[in-house]
Amino acid sequence: MRLNSVCLTFALLALFSSLSAGATDVKVKEEAVGAVEKRRAEMIKLSDQIWAFAETALREHKSSEALSRYAEQQGFEVERGVAGMPTAFIASYGQGRPVIGILGEFDALPGISQKASPVKEPLEAGAPGHSCGHNLFGVASLGAAIAVKELMAAGKLKGTIQQRLIQPTAEGAKGRRGKTCPDRSLRPFAPSAVELSVPILSWSFSGPGKPEKAARMSGTSGSARNN
C-alpha cells in the first residue's frame, strides 16, 4: 500500500535525524515500521475520508479536524489556527531538541471531482477533488510522526517530533509563500524553529534546480522528495 510506504519513508528519515551516530540499529527501525503497520487500517480510513471531503484551500475544516483529532488521540498536543489560518495546525510530542518537523498537505483542487477509477469519472461534475495525493500526504506525515513519537514514548529517542500541517493552501503555493496570510504566518517555517523540516512532495522532474525549488517553496531547512 502506497500510503504505508510513504509513512515509513518519512518516519525513517526523521528517525535517522533523531538518533545519535552509531545508534541506528535494526530493532529500532523495525519498531518504527511496526508502529505504522499497527495503524494501517486507521490511516487508510482517514486518507479515504480526506479524499471524500475534497476541501479546497483554506476551507479544509473537516479534513483539518479529522487529522488533528486523530493526532490528539495518539497523544500529541495540537495547536490549531496556526498563523491566523483556521485549518492549519501543529501536532507536537516530546520536549527539547532536536525538533523534527514533518510537513504535510491536505487541500483539494477545484473542478476535478473524481471517483476511485482509472478513467475520468467525476463524483459530482464541477466539484473539487484530489489529483496529486494530498489526501495521502497529510495522513502520511501524521503516520510518520506517530512512528517516531512511539519511540520517544518508550524512551528510545529524545527531542520533539511535530506534524506541521501549516500549508493548508498548498495547491496555490500561497500558504507556503504567505501571500494570503499575515506576515507572521511565515514564522513557523523559520529554520531556527526546527533542526530538520521534512516535506512530503510528489515531484516529477528532470534537469537541475527543481528539487531545490520544491524545498524553497516548502520553506524547509532540510528536504526530502517522494516520487
Image (cartoon, rainbow, N blue to C red):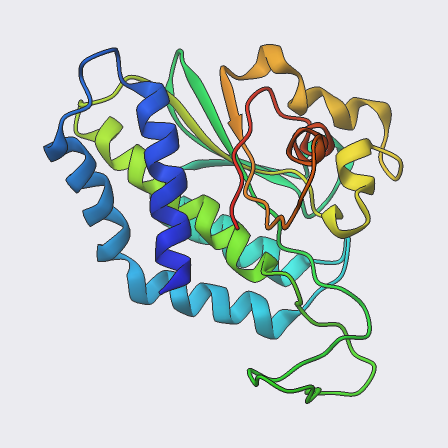
Q: Residue 82: in sight, yes or no?
A: yes
**Residue 21 appears left or right of 81:** left
Quarter of the view holding residue 46: bottom left
Pinpoint residue 5: horizontal percent, then vertical percent: 36, 53
Pinpoint residue 60: horizontal percent, then vertical percent: 69, 58
Residue placed farthest to the front in the image? Answer: 207
- Front residue of 56 and 116: 116
- Name the residue rendered at 38%, 29% in the picture: 14
- Name the residue rendered at 85%, 24% in the picture: 183
- Name the residue rendered at 57%, 55% in the picture: 65
- Front residue of 88 and 9: 9
Residue placed farthest to the right in the image? Answer: 179
**Residue 74 appears left or right of 23:** right
Quarter of the view holding residue 148: top left
Q: How many marks?
A: 0
Pinpoint residue 64: horizontal percent, then vertical percent: 60, 53
Pinpoint residue 109: horizontal percent, then vertical percent: 76, 64
Quarter of the view holding residue 15: top left
Q: Residue 145: in sight, yes or no?
A: no
Whether residue 53 is situated above or below residue 147 in the rendered picture? below
Whether residue 34 is situated above or below residue 152 in the rendered picture? below
**Residue 128 appears left or right of 180:** left
Whether residue 2 is situated above or below residue 174 in the rendered picture? below
Question: Which quarter of the rendering shows the N terminus?
Answer: bottom left
- Name the residue rendered at 41%, 69% in the picture: 45
- Front residue of 214 and 111: 214
